[in-house]
Amino acid sequence: MPKEKLQMLIDKLKIRDNKAYEFFERIALDLTSERSKNEGLIKLKGCFAITQYADFTFEEEELLSEIIDEINSNE
């Protein structure tokens, strides 16, 4: 699981004061619990559309894409 990349994305969003970081912080919290880890992974895999609605930069989109690709390749 690309936890470091997820934290990088959260940090980048926070710096720009993009409130989408809150969504990713909740997912990061899910990933720390064995009980909710799968739910967090499912949310991450299906969340790319947030980039359109939350005004992501190209760099943030690329980072999220890398995270999703890593999750899909580990299945």
Image (cartoon, helix red, strand yellow):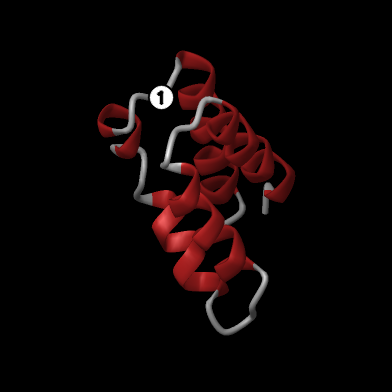
Q: Please, is residue 57 above or below residue 28 in the view?
A: above
**Left or right: 64 with respect to 12?**
left
Residue in view at x 49 percent, y 65 percent: 40
16 or 48: which is nearer to us? 16
The residue at 56%/50% (across/down) is 71
Q: Which residue is mark 1?
A: 56
Residue 28 placement (x, y as % from top left)? 60, 59
Q: Quick one: which residue is furthest to the bottom in this view? A: 35
The quadrant where residue 52 appears: top left
Apparent side of residue 53 relative to residue 5 in the rendered image (left or right): left
How would you rate the neighbour count of disc 1 (Cα within 10 Å): few for under 14, some for 14-19, many for 20 or more? some
Question: Which residue is the extreme one toward the top?
Answer: 58
Q: Quadrant of the C terminus?
A: bottom right
Question: How many numbered discs sit on the rendered protein?
Answer: 1
Q: Nearer the viewer, residue 63 or 19?
A: 19
Say whether residue 28 is left or right of residue 58: right
Seen in the picture, residue 46 relative to 9 is either above or below; the reply is below
The residue that appears at 67% across and 54% down in the rendered structure is 1
Q: Residue 24 vs residue 54: left or right?
A: right
Residue at 51% x, 34% y is 64
Q: Secondary structure at mark 1?
A: loop
Residue farthest along the right direction in this orientation: 4
Q: Nearer the viewer, residue 71 or 19?
A: 19
> Percent position (x, y) of residue 51?
35, 31
Q: Is residue 63 above or below residue 75?
A: above
Spot occupied by residue 19 in the image (x, y as percentages of width and height): 42, 41
**What amino acid does circle 1 point to?**
Phe
